[in-house]
């Protein structure tokens, strides 16, 4: 019976080698897919960043001109900073609010299932629906202004005023992100054995001290994970500015992915768009590298 | 024996080729989404399919904003439709890259291009001509005119037929009697410009600038001249209803969202500039309360207005035979201008449009004279392959002046810097 | 104040904040539902109407008739389910391989896979389209589904989860003569249910409303997804918002249902996958 089922191709190889191949074969489908649909296009995009390409005539080699043009384009710099503001504007509140949410839900509150449902509902809403509903709510004649009017704040044209457009979008980002990261934190909290907290209380620690010295240190990897995932996902945001503000007013909501899309498909400057995307990619890569380094220092892998 | 065999084979080949073309083929036609006229397009397609069982048309339409991006992406990968609708402002970005097939007037039933021009209103084809060749056949000629709400005028003690504004300053004056305030909030604007799209901004700004004797680009389309004297005056007009006359308020108006022409039928604004197609979009009930008058002027003695249009273009990668077929389809689509007008309220720029039978009624009830008048005095926006970059820069400049009250000259200087940078790129 | 009073007030404040928080969270949903039942003039009425005077149930059939929404929703469902299935299968395979096997360049492969998370679609839109066209998949379900069928996040999730499964289980199965394939199907997958549930939910949600990719890949009306239909409803000049909201409500139903049913598995899946690691 042992001889029948062992291996399916190379029964003569050692167990070690066979397992080696098996592991590789398991990963192979994913790798192939990613090579064809992610890595190859990425390499192509990198190659295109050195060409002038307007999508309709053949590409012409252009050296590093695209990078120079992008660097000298004030609109690119504006977009870069809009993206940075958006990323941190959404992520940082998310870190704290999602954590607070998880703490809240971890205590046995009455009606917990209902509360949990309510808070986690935004996870179920599709992106495009979010964009359309919020656009609707931010209308000068819409709900948000009505509610503010009830507390005495005047009418603001949210999506058409330079100072308020980006904050309006950031609010939506936070609204949508808190449930997801809250779940991740909650999961982390629930996996801390109760003994640790009990030991702390026995030692005389109050709730705040317990939090600072027991919970947070144990949650460090989760916290770091949330920090980087929230930044990366905020960086990729594109649909909301597209549907809600078209990057305006005056470019104050033109995040970098939108700049790239516009440069490639509206202005037909694919090479420049590719160069700008390489900058975006390098930025994201640096961010992720920082996380991996911090994780390793945190002693976990 | 051999000669017989060769003859048989040749005959077989001929039969095969002829027979092959008897199999059903398709022509694909792409359009942008535009509710009243998409329905008429579908009717035309159904008509054609009935009479052309071996050459069926497949019609698809897409939301306006992504449509042109999809078109560029498809043209780049040679997967675009056989025939597609283009807007005149974006035509140069395609013709300069030779992704449109030149139109053959002979295949449309004309002797040559000059002959074809005579069939249209003077200048109507100019928007589609590049380097002396025609690249698209017009389907719709649109122009901007001034719509006003009769009831509001009458309530304010004005006579809509006599007191309607003829100049931009008139709008300001008349508007002050029409605006409604509640405390410091404007509950009804007297007049509004649409602010939702850079295309509309360009049309307004080009119209205004031309009226002052300038234009946004120099005639060669190589340098930005929007920050000249004419442009600055144009920008001042653009923003004076907000800041000087105070009859317009961007925070009240829905024109800052994608609903520009919605304010007028809902009674939130008394006067609004929009295009001829709005007549059909508003519907007869709303139009009962409306009046349409010509595009406001700086100098009514020398009227200048703005026109744009949609036209049908042909995919250049088609075989010559297929291109001929597409030309047949084009003929079918544009063959009945009166029907176009009836079903979509968009005029068609044929030379004899006003004289077509049945037009008299339209002239009386649908303001056709006004629209045709504006078309006759209208010019297309200056051609440029970088149209979108230019219009986005102008749109941002407008936003800075209207929303932040920035100085028009400074704002236009910045726009010109951005535009010149874009034009300078190889 | 005594610590008791403090904690009492603290508790009350907490309750108030919680309720306020729920209010903010659910406000868009409420608004969406309410607007979908209004007439087109009620939608932008001033002052704001919270509830329609009379629920306009006819908005729903009217909205659906504005485009071939039956087809669009069907396509969205097909794309979402197929991509979900693809992810569930391929990501668990890859996660298993990365978690429980040792082979040369394993860590490098993992890092490379993770790096694809940093790619927004817009960057690689045209090259990806060229690949799809080269494979002859333009304007087909294959073209809509296959490029999306594997996502690095799923691989990451499954790897983390499977790592925590005891090695002894696997070794025992090997000793019993089970083939590697058998181990995967009979031992690993059944023990991955929470993670699979979480992944299924997230993948479905993220792909149910695909917009940009179908826009580029599909031109046949019969292949469009519902976001493309929604975008078409916002015509050049006027948007029937009450009808758009009706479609939005309909669009929310599948994800809401799936979420309601899989909520617990979702939390457990994330929890046990050791994302805390």
Image (tube, coloured by chain):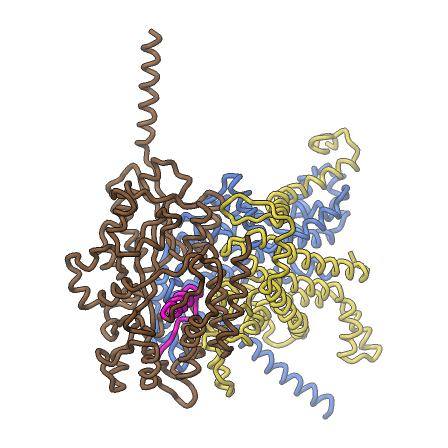
Viewer-proximal residue, C265 or A293? A293
Q: Position of residue C159 (x, y in %)?
A: 70, 51
Which residues lie in the magenta part?
B191-211
Residue A257 seen by the camera: yes
Residue name at image x 76 percent, y 42 percent: C103
Quadrant placement of the C terminus of chain A: bottom right
Q: Position of residue C261 (x, y in %)?
A: 54, 61
Number of dots carrying numbers: 0
Residue A34 seen by the camera: no
The picture's colour for chain A is: yellow
Q: Position of residue B155 (x, y in %)?
A: 26, 85
Q: Position of residue A291 (x, y in %)?
A: 74, 60
Q: Is residue C10 left or right of residue C125?
A: right
Residue C11 vs B418, above or below: the answer is below
Residue name at image x 67 percent, y 87 percent: C8
The picture's colour for chain C is: blue
Viewer-proximal residue, B317 or C122? B317
Does B341 appear in magenta? no
Quadrant placement of the N terminus of chain A: top right
The picture's colour for chain B is: brown
Q: Is residue A199 left or right of residue B359?
A: right
Viewer-proximal residue, C275 or B219? B219
User: What's the magenta bit mostly, secondary-structure-wise?
Assistant: helix
Does B205 appear in magenta? yes
Residue name at image x 38 percent, y 76 percent: B192
């Amino acid at each position: 019976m042992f001889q029948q089922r062992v291996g399916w191709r190379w029964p003569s190889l050692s167990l070690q080698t066979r397992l080696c191949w098996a592991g590789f074969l398991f990963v192979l489908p994913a790798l192939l897919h990613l090579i064809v649909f992610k890595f190859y296009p990425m390499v192509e995009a990198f190659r295109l960043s050195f060409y002038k390409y307007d999508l309709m005539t053949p590409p012409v080699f252009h050296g590093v001109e695209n990078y120079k043009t992008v660097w000298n384009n004030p609109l690119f710099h504006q977009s870069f900073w809009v993206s940075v503001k958006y990323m941190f504007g959404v992520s940082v509140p998310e870190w704290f609010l999602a954590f607070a949410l998880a703490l809240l839900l971890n205590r046995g509150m009455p009606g917990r299932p209902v509360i949990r449902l309510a808070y986690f509902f935004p996870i179920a809403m599709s992106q495009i629906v979010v964009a359309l509903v919020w656009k609707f709510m931010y209308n000068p004649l819409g709900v948000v202004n009505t509610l503010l009017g009830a507390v005495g704040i005047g009418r603001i044209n949210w999506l058409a005023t330079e100072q308020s457009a980006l904050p309006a979008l950031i609010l939506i980002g936070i609204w949508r992100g808190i449930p997801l990261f809250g779940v991740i934190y909650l999961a982390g909290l629930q996996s801390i054995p109760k003994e640790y907290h009990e030991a702390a209380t026995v030692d005389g620690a109050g709730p705040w001290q317990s939090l600072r010295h027991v919970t947070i240190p144990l949650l460090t990897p989760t916290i770091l994970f949330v920090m980087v995932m929230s930044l990366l996902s905020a960086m990729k945001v594109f649909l909301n500015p597209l549907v809600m503000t078209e990057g305006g007013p005056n470019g104050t909501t033109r995040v970098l992915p939108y700049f790239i899309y516009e440069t490639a498909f509206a202005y037909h400057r694919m090479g420049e768009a590719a160069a700008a995307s390489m900058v975006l990619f390098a930025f994201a890569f640096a961010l992720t590298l920082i996380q991996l380094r911090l994780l390793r220092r945190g002693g976990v892998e | 024996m051999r000669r017989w065999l060769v003859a048989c084979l040749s005959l077989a080949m001929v039969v095969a080729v002829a027979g092959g073309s008897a199999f059903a083929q398709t022509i694909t036609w792409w359009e942008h989404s535009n509710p009243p006229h998409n329905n008429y397009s579908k009717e035309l397609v159904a008509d054609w399919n009935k009479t052309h069982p071996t050459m069926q048309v497949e019609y698809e339409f897409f939301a306006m904003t992504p449509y042109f991006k999809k078109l560029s992406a498809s043209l780049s990968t040679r997967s675009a439709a056989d025939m597609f609708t283009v807007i005149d402002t974006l035509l140069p970005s395609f013709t300069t890259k030779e992704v449109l097939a030149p139109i053959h007037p002979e295949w449309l039933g004309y002797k040559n291009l000059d002959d074809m021009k005579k069939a249209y209103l003077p200048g109507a084809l100019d928007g589609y001509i590049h380097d002396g060749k025609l690249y698209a056949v017009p389907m719709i000629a649109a122009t901007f005119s001034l719509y006003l709400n009769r009831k509001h005028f009458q309530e304010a003690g004005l006579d809509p037929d006599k007191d309607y504004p003829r100049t931009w300053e008139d709008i300001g004056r008349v508007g002050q009697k029409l605006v409604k305030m509640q405390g410091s909030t404007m509950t009804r604007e007297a007049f509004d410009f649409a602010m939702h799209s850079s295309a509309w901004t360009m049309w307004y700004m080009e119209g205004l600038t031309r009226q002052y004797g300038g234009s946004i680009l120099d005639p060669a389309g190589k340098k930005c001249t929007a920050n000249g004297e004419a442009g600055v005056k144009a920008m001042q007009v653009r923003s004076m209803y907000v800041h000087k006359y105070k009859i317009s308020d961007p925070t009240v108006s829905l024109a800052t969202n994608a609903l520009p022409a919605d304010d007028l039928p809902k009674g939130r604004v008394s006067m609004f500039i929009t295009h001829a197609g709005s007549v059909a979009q508003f519907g007869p009930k709303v139009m009962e309360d409306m009046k349409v008058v010509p595009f406001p002027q700086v100098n009514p003695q020398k009227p200048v207005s703005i026109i744009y249009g949609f036209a049908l273009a042909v995919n250049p990668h088609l075989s010559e035979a297929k291109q001929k077929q597409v030309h047949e389809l084009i003929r079918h689509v544009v063959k009945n201008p009166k029907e176009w007008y009836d079903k979509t309220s968009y005029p068609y720029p044929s030379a004899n449009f006003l004289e077509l039978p049945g037009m008299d009624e339209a002239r009386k009830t649908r303001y056709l004279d006004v629209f045709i008048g504006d078309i006759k005095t209208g010019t297309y926006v200056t051609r440029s392959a970088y149209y979108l970059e230019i219009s986005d820069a102008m749109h941002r400049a407008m936003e800075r002046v209207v929303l932040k009250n920035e100085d028009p000259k400074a704002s236009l200087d910045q726009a010109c810097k951005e535009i010149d940078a874009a034009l300078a790129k190889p | 104040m005594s610590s008791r009073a403090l904690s009492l007030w603290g508790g009350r404040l907490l309750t108030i904040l919680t309720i306020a928080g729920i209010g903010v969270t659910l406000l868009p949903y409420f608004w969406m539902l309410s607007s979908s039942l209004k007439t087109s003039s009620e939608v932008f009425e001033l002052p704001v109407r919270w509830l329609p005077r009379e629920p306009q149930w006819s908005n729903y059939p009217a909205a659906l008739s504005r485009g071939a929404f039956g087809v669009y929703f069907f396509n969205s469902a097909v794309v979402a389910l197929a991509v979900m299935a693809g992810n569930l299968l391929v990501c668990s395979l890859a996660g298993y391989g990365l978690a429980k096997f040792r082979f040369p360049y394993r860590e490098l492969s993992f890092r490379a896979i993770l790096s694809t998370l940093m790619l927004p679609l817009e960057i690689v839109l045209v090259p990806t389209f060229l690949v799809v066209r080269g494979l002859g998949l333009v304007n087909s379900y294959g073209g809509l589904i296959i490029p999306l069928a594997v996502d690095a996040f799923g691989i990451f999730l499954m790897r983390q989860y499977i790592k925590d499964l005891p090695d002894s289980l696997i070794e025992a199965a090997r000793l019993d003569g089970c083939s590697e394939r058998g181990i995967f199907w009979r031992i690993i997958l059944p023990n991955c249910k929470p993670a699979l549930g979480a992944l299924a939910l997230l993948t479905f949600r993220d792909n149910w409303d695909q917009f940009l990719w179908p826009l580029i890949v599909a031109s046949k009306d019969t292949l469009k997804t519902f976001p493309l239909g929604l975008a078409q409803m916002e015509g050049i000049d006027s948007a029937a918002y009450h009808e758009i909201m009706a479609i939005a409500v309909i669009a929310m139903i599948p994800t809401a249902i799936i979420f309601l049913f899989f909520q617990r598995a979702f939390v457990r899946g994330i929890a046990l996958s050791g994302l805390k690691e």
